[in-house]
Amino acid sequence: MIQRHLIQTIIAVILYLVTALAAIYLINPQSIVNFVGPSAALMSGLLLLWGVTPFIAVVVASPLLAISIRYYFNLDANVAVMTIAVLAITLQGVWVRHLAYRFIHYKKWITSRKHLFFFLLRIGPIGSLVSASAVLVIAMLDNQVMQGSFFYTFINTWSASMLIAVFFIPLLLMVKNTEEFTFTKRLFVGVTSIFGGVIIFVLLKTSQFEQQYFRQTLFQQSSAEVKRLILAEIETVENKINSTGAFFKASEHVKLDEFILFSDSIFKQNSSVRALEWAPIVTFTQRAAFEQKNTDLFGADFKITERLANGQIGIAEPRNQYAPLHYIYPEKGNQVVLGLDVFSNPQHILNMQNVIDSGELVASAPITLVQDKLASPGMLFSKAIFLPSSHGKSSYAKQNEGRASKSTAQKNLSLLSDNTLLGFVVAVVQFDAFFERLTKDKSLDVNLLIQDVSNSAKPITLFGHTFPTTNRNVDTKTISFFSRHWQINIGEKQPWFSQSQSWQAWAVLVGGTIGAVLFQMLVLMMAAYSRELGLQVDIKTRALILARERSEQKSSAKTHFLQTLNTEFRVPLLALKSSVEQLKKKGINNKDVNGISHAGSNIAMLLDTMMDLSNIESGKITPKSDCFDFYGFLQRIESVIKASNHYENKSTYFLIDESVPHYINSDELYIQKLLHALIESAHHVLATDMLRLSIKLHKQKNQERSASLFFTVSSLHPATDGLNKELFNKEKNKQLTTDSTSLAMAIKYSQLLRGDTNLGVLSSGAGVLNSSIQITISSNEEQEIQQSLTFDLLK
């Protein structure tokens, strides 16, 4: 007993692990929820056969399964998920056992199509609701989301569990109940079910592949679109900065209202630029005049300021040149940075020397703006604006030409190649609103995490936060622009299990499931119907056997009765014959004595007929198949009929067709009795004294020697003779179960010789009596042997 349970447990553990891992591997996308439905259906089937042993296997193998899932599939098989899965598998097994117990215990599930239908309904659609419901909770835990519709996940798990149950459990029961099915039937059902299961699996697998391919394609398109839109937004910012730089480069002097008018036209285009700023080059000697001029312009005390070490803003220290923010658009909200020297920006954020050296647009690291106390980071895009040397040198350049003590850095600040530095165009850029629009775009439907990774040791988050990646497509894009490097992490908002599915996915899932269940039900229905027919045949066979036994008993009783009656009649009949013989010996041979003798002969003939009928019905008589001269036999019959007193004043003409052979193999004695009974009954039924007996042969196809002899008795003059219509109709309606002893014996003799006797009517209205027997045409060797015997007798 212990050894049997141990073997069952080992088998259950192996099947459980193989089924769970195969389900996770084969069902796309790979997820921990995939194994619950198939494993629950498998364990339900084993529970119906082995009791609690599969439960032990599930509990023992689940930790090993969790480790395998983590190692091979990198899925989070945590304690909560595995606990719920084990409980779901156990509960479904108990539920299915409760639903199908009577069908299994009394072996009713295959006895009829009705029982089979309700059995499949209980183990499949109804039982699978348990694992499908549990998967909803597991999916929420695994995907780390509580919102969205998991209905497709519910139907998908329900379908997988139901298909495994409908295909696996009946095959398992057929293997167990081998006495209920023949080997051929088990082989047919098994092979057909496996073939159908493979076809359905290939169909669903192909559909899953197409769905995931379409999903992956859409995600890749969204990912590429996100990158394209971000680059397009950066290009828009670049174009606005270049336009502003060209504006200052093309004008010798730009007034504030001109700058505002120009910037206003640029800002009408929606972009991430928060502010445009112009910072001209101002020398130390020009500082006082510059501050006074702008105090009058803005109507407020204007000072050149700088960013202090503690991040605050203070009055700029004296130095050779400054680049204060002179014009700002929009001014509202940005007054705090008006006059701020851009040369004071921290070197790690935006090195102005790099801006001058590059001659191109340079972007700063993400920073918290002075005018923005919120957490949203911003960026400074800056470009140095140079005036070509052909336009003449500015006062700033002239004042610095004679300074021999300038440092190399100051030389770089004053001159670059042959161009004169006019100032800097600075754009304050915040991409939050743009990124927010991307995440809310339903056509993209993605989460974004964008980081500045220019300093790989310390990435800075520009937008978003870490999002869950379980059961989601994830992509990482890297873009480089203006000395910055961004890493864009893109992921689906919803996992596959809570995403809305196309009607094609629903059609394949629902249609494939229904088709597979109907296919398996049809196969099992055929087996059930075959079993029903087998049971009905067995019942009918037993009934026929009982009827035959009763008939044999009745026939035996009848035969015994007839034998007893024959014996009892024979004794007085023998005494009567003996008395008649004694009277004849004494010379008494008058009419009365002859009448008594004739009556005794008739009684003896009736007793012989009765015994023949009894022996035929009881099967004690077996006809012979001896070779004899059929033409000579017919001549003897004709002679006997003509010489018989019984046929006095009656005549019978024999018409033999040329197809009738001379020698045949049959029972000569019973053919003789058949002809006598046939002729006698024909005189009575056809009501005529002149008969015509036609004899024809009909050969059977593909059999050279087997043939049928037909005896047709009709009136010689049907137009003048009468017809015993009352008796004829009686005979025909009763199907020859008549009161005529001779006709009854004709029927029995023909049946004994594997033929039949019946009545018919010609087109002229004349009646005929037909009889047929089966014969074998004698071979040449048999004819020669019979002829030699005849010649020996003649000698």
Image (cartoon, rainbow, N blue to C red):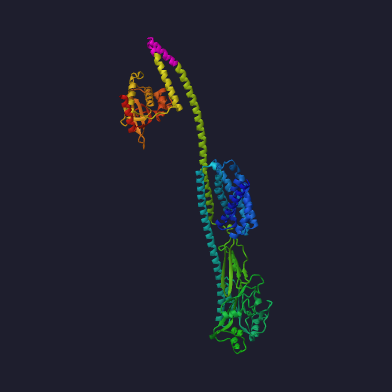
* Relative depth, front residue between 282 and 527: 527
Residue nearer the viewer, 492 or 58: 58
Which quarter shows the N terminus? Answer: top right
- Is 292 in the magenta? no
Q: Quadrant of the C terminus?
A: top left
Depth check, front residue: 587 or 79: 587
Instruction: Tell whether 420 sits left or right of 728.
Output: right
Q: Residue 581 at what x, y percent from top left?
A: 40, 13
The answer to whether residue 308 is left or right of residue 740 is right
Residue 519 in the image, given as x and y percentages of width and height: 51, 48
Residue sitting at x 43%, y 16%:
574
Residue 147 visible? The answer is no
Would you place residue 35 above or below residue 585 in this image?
A: below
Q: Position of residue 567 (x, y in %)?
A: 46, 19
Magenta span: predominant SS is helix
In this rendering, is residue 360 above or below 113? below
Is residue 620 positioned above or below 494 on the image?
above
Report which quarter residue 408 is drawn in: bottom right
- Residue depicted at x 62% and y 89%: 405
The one of 281 and 375 positioned closer to us in this rendering = 375
From the top left corner, tell me how far across and down residue 612 is, in percent. Answer: 43, 24
Is there any visible trace of residue 437 in the rendered image?
yes
Q: Which residues are magenta?
A: 572-594
* 576 is within the stretch colored magenta: yes
Q: Exactly how many numbered labels are in the figure?
A: 0
